C-alpha cells in the first residue's frame, strides 16, 4: 500500500510508477533527507508535538537508516516514488508505527526544497574550493612565467606583446568573479523552507527557526507559497555554473590553439592527452576539448530549468521534480572539469622561446613606435600614419620587421626617430612601458599576483568557516 494510498481504489499502473518516480536520481539526496528529518523531529519534540520517547525512537531509527544507506545495504523501491517516501517507509519498517509520526506538520513539498538546498550548499563549497585550486595552479604558473612574453591578440591577430603571466591572470580574475557569484548565492540557498507544509503552512504549533538554526541555515523562507515553489536558487546556480564553464571553455580553446603545431606555445603533458586509433603520430588535447564541449550541456541544463519553471502556477507542481537531474549533472560536470584542470595546467610545458619568437617576428611594437613619435611632439594621428607607412614598407621589402630597418631607413619616414628606438621597441621594453595599474608591465603583473594571493586567502577563510558550520550541524545530529 502506498503511503498516500487511502483515497485510491486501484493500484498505480506500473508504467506510471516508473514514469513519476524520482528515486532513480533523488537517492542522491538521502543524506540531506535524513539530516533534515533529524532537525524536523528535534523541533517537533522541543515544541511538544512529539514526546521525548517518540522523537528519540525516530532519531535512532533515522541514524540506523543513514548508516545502512551509507553501507549500501538498502534497496530503494520505485513504488515508493522518491527518496522521501522511501526513507519514511524504511523508518516505519525499522521502528514500527511511531515512524509514521515523522511527517507530522511537513509535506514532501517543503521537504524536497530543503533537501535541495542542503545538497547545493555543500556542493557550492566543493566547487568554490576547486575553483580556488585552479586559481592557485594558474597563479603558480604565472609566477614562474612572469617575464615570458607572448603576443597579445585582438581578432586573433597579433596586437601588442604581453607577459604570459598577464594572460593567465586574466583567467584567475574571471574565476574570482565565478567564486564570488557562488559565494553570493550561498545566502539565498541557505534558507529553510521547512514549515511551509504543502503550500500554506501547518496547523501544528511548530517553530521554523528551531529547524533553520539546527541546520545552520541563515533564516527561513518568508512566504510558504514561495518556499515550496522557489527554484531560483537552482537557476542561479546553473547560471553561475554556465559562466564558470564558459570561462574554462575559453581557456580550453586557447590551450588547444597554443598546443597546435602552428603555435607550439605550450605542450600539454602526455598524461592529459590521448592518441588516435588510426594516426600513430597524434597527441590530442582531449581534456581541453571535452571541457569546451561540455559547456553545451551546462548551458542546456540552465535552459531546461528556466523552461520548466516558466508558466508554472503557484505552488508546487510535479514539473518541479525536473529540477534535480540538471543540477546534479551540472555539479558533476563542473567538478570533473575543475579537478582535471589544475593538474593539466601544472604539468603543461611552456615554450618560452617560441612565444618570444612570435613577439619579435612581428609588428606588435608598432603602437610603441607611434607613441615614441608622440612623445617627440607629433600628434598621434600623424604618428599613426607614419608608422603605417613604415609597416607597409617592411611588408613590401619582404620578411622585414621594424627593428630590422636601419636608422637611415627609419629616418626617411620621420626625422624624429633616433638611435634609442632600437631599445624602446624590444619586446620587454614594450611590455614594461605599459606600467599602469592592471597593465602588463612586469611589476604590474607582480602586483596582480599579490592581489591574487590575498583573494585566495579570503576564499580559504570563507570556505573553512562554512565547512565548520556544516560539520557542526552533522555532529549536532550525531551523524557523521
Ligand atoms: N519527488 C518529488 C520532487 O522531487 C517530491 C515532492 C513531491 N510532492 C508532491 N506533492 N508530489 O519534486
Image (cartoon, rainbow, N blue to C red):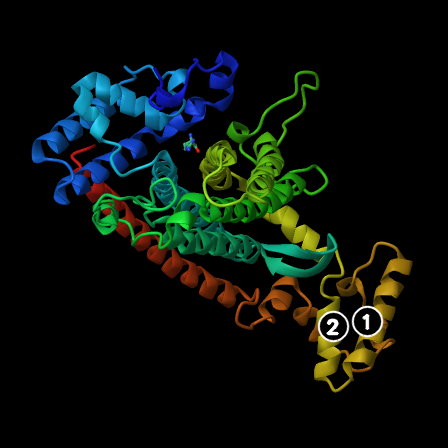
Query: Which of disc 1 and disc 2 is earlier in sequence?
Result: 2
Query: Residue 197 falls in which quadrant of the image?
Result: top left
* Residue 411 in picture, x, y percent from top left: 83, 77
Q: Which mark is residue 387?
A: 1
Choose between 103 and 338: the one closer to the eye. Answer: 103
Quarter of the image where ligand 1 sits: top left
Q: Secondary structure at mark 2?
A: helix
Residue furthest to the right: 396
Query: Is residue 418 something one can see in this rendering?
Result: no
- Alpha carbons under labels 2 and 1: distance apart: 7 Å
Depth order, front residue of 116/389: 116
Please tell me whether residue 88 is drawn above or below residue 201 in the rendered image.
above
At 48% from the left and 48% from the top, the residue drawn is: 232
Instruction: Please tell me how many numbered marks the rendered image carries.
Output: 2
Residue 460 seen by the camera: yes
Q: Position of residue 208 (x, y in %)?
A: 25, 49
- Residues tagged 2 and 1 counted as in contact (Cβ below 8 A): yes
Question: Is 161 rendered above or below residue 479?
Answer: below
Read off the residue under disc 2. 369
Q: Is residue 122 left or right of residue 257?
A: left
As drawn, the residue found furthest toward the bottom would be 377
User: Badge 1: how crowded within 10 Å, few (<14), some, or many (20+)?
Assistant: many
Amino acid at each position: 500500500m502506498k503511503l498516500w494510498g487511502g483515497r485510491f481504489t486501484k493500484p498505480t499502473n506500473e508504467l506510471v510508477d516508473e514514469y513519476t518516480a524520482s528515486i532513480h536520481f533523488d537517492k542522491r539526496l538521502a543524506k540531506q533527507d535524513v539530516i533534515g528529518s533529524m532537525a524536523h523531529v528535534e523541533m517537533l519534540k522541543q515544541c511538544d508535538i512529539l514526546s521525548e520517547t517518540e522523537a528519540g525512537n525516530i532519531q535512532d531509527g533515522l541514524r540506523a537508516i543513514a548508516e545502512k544507506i551509507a553501507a549500501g545495504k538498502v534497496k530503494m523501491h520505485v513504488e515508493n516514488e522518491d527518496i522521501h517516501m522511501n526513507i519514511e517507509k524504511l523508518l516505519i519498517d525499522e521502528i514500527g508505527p511511531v515512524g509514521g509520526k515523522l511527517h507530522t506538520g511537513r509535506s514532501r513539498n517543503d521537504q524536497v526544497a530543503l533537501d535541495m538546498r542542503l545538497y547545493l550548499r555543500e556542493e557550492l563549497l566543493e566547487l568554490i574550493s576547486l575553483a580556488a585550486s585552479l586559481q592557485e595552479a594558474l597563479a603558480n604558473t604565472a609566477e614562474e612565467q612572469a617575464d615570458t612574453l607572448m603576443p597579445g591578440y585582438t581578432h586573433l591577430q597579433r596586437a601588442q606583446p604581453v607577459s604570459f603571466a598577464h594572460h593567465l591572470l586574466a583567467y584567475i580574475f574571471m574565476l574570482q568573479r565565478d567564486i564570488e557569484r557562488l559565494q553570493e548565492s550561498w545566502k539565498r540557498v541557505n534558507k529553510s523552507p521547512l514549515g511551509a507544509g504543502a503550500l500554506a503552512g501547518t496547523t501544528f504549533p511548530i517553530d521554523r527557526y528551531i529547524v533553520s538554526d539546527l541546520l545552520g541555515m541563515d533564516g527561513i523562507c518568508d512566504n510558504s507559497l514561495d518556499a515550496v515553489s522557489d527554484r531560483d536558487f537552482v537557476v542561479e546556480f546553473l547560471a553561475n555554473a554556465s559562466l564558470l564553464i564558459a570561462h574554462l571553455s575559453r581557456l580550453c580553446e586557447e590551450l588547444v590553439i597554443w598546443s597546435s603545431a602552428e603555435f607550439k606555445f605550450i605542450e600539454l603533458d602526455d598524461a592529459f592527452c590521448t592518441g588516435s586509433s588510426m594516426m600513430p603520430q597524434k597527441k590530442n588535447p582531449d581534456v581541453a576539448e571535452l571541457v569546451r564541449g561540455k559547456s553545451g550541456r551546462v548551458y542546456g541544463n540552465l535552459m531546461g530549468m528556466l523552461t520548466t519553471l516558466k508558466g508554472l502556477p503557484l505552488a508546487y507542481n510535479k514539473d518541479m521534480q525536473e529540477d534535480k537531474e540538471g543540477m546534479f549533472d551540472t555539479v558533476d560536470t563542473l567538478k570533473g572539469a575543475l579537478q582535471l584542470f589544475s593538474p593539466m595546467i601544472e604539468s603543461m610545458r611552456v615554450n618560452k622561446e617560441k612565444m618570444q619568437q612570435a613577439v619579435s617576428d612581428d609588428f606588435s611594437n608598432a603602437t610603441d613606435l607611434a607613441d615614441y613619435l608622440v612623445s617627440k611632439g607629433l600628434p598621434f594621428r600623424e604618428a599613426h600614419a607614419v608608422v603605417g607607412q613604415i609597416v607597409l614598407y617592411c611588408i613590401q621589402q619582404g620578411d622585414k620587421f621594424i627593428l630590422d630597418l636601419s636608422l637611415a631607413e627609419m629616418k626617411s619616414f620621420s626625422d624624429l626617430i633616433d638611435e634609442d628606438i632600437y631599445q624602446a621597441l624590444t619586446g620587454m621594453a614594450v611590455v614594461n612601458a605599459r606600467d599602469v595599474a592592471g597593465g602588463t608591465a612586469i611589476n604590474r603583473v607582480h602586483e596582480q599576483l599579490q592581489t591574487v594571493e590575498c583573494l585566495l586567502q579570503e576564499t580559504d577563510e570563507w570556505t573553512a568557516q562554512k565547512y565548520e558550520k556544516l560539520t557542526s550541524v552533522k555532529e549536532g545530529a550525531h551523524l557523521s
